[in-house]
Image (cartoon, grey):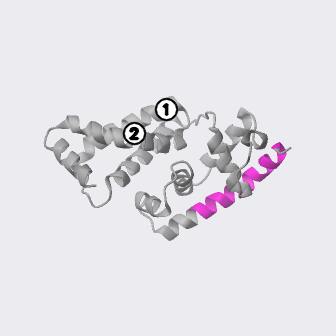
């Protein structure tokens, strides 16, 4: 954080080249976050760029009361939701094997040896993403931050300006809702 404070002070003092250090440090994390919402790689890249551009323009409003990463995550989430509202039609991309495995673990409580035997085909992947997309906004945000970005409940609480208990509750409701929708799909594809 100390290093970040120094970088931010330098940028605000006119050394805008220093901003690239913040971009390099957080680019991958913001991309993963945004991809959880918008799914298409190209769209996620665009929204990630917009996030860093907005953060740069708004850097003077960063007051340091929270971690820089928390502030940046909030911008990323807001940019992702703005993108989705503008587009209105959500597109679906292929889910990485690790994401399929994470969903199998969510439903069955254990990782699968071969996730492709549990879930196969683009249609099933689309259904899974659609079900995540249909979660209420706060549940979806908490779920993506937890499962895709692997953030702790405390970090999620800071980003969403909620208590840790509220985050735990959102995650439990999201998991319960996804299980209800996805168990029939998973069972249908088991051999």
Residue at (44%, 44%) from the top-left corner?
A: 29
Read off the magenta span: 171-189
Q: Quadrant of the N terminus?
A: bottom left
Element on which disc 1 rests:
helix
Q: Residue furthest bottom?
A: 165
Kindly identify which residue carries mark 1: 43
Residue 133: x and y, percent?
60, 46
Residue 23: x and y, percent?
33, 39
Q: Is residue 184 magenta?
A: yes
Q: Earlier in the sequence, mark 1 or mark 2?
A: 2
Q: Is residue 47 above or below residue 175?
A: above
Q: Is residue 112 magenta?
A: no
Contact (CB < 8 A) between labels 1 and 2?
no
Q: Is residue 83 above or below residue 6?
A: above
Element on which disc 2 rests:
helix
Question: Which sits in the foreground, 145 or 43?
Answer: 145
Residue at (43%, 43%) from the top-left corner?
A: 30
Chief SS of the magenta region: helix
Q: Residue furthest right?
A: 191
> Tag on residue 70?
none
Kindly identify which residue carries mark 2: 27
């Amino acid at each position: 954080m100390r290093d970040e404070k120094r970088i931010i002070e330098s940028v605000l003092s006119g050394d805008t080249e220093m901003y690239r250090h913040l971009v390099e440090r957080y680019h991958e994390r913001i991309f993963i976050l945004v991809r959880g919402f918008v799914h298409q790689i190209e769209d996620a890249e665009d929204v990630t760029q917009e996030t860093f551009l907005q953060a740069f323009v708004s850097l003077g409003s960063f007051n340091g009361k929270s971690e820089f990463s928390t502030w940046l995550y909030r911008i990323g989430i807001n940019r992702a939701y703005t993108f989705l509202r503008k587009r209105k039609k959500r597109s679906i991309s292929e889910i990485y094997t690790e994401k399929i495995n994470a969903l199998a673990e969510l439903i069955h409580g254990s990782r699968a040896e071969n996730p492709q035997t549990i879930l196969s085909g683009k249609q099933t992947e689309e259904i899974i993403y659609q079900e995540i997309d249909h979660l209420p906004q706060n549940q979806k945000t908490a779920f993506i931050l937890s499962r895709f970005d692997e953030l702790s409940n405390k970090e999620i609480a800071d980003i969403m300006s909620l208590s840790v208990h509220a985050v735990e509750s959102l995650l439990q409701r999201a998991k319960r809702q996804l299980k209800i929708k996805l168990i029939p799909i998973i069972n249908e594809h088991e051999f």
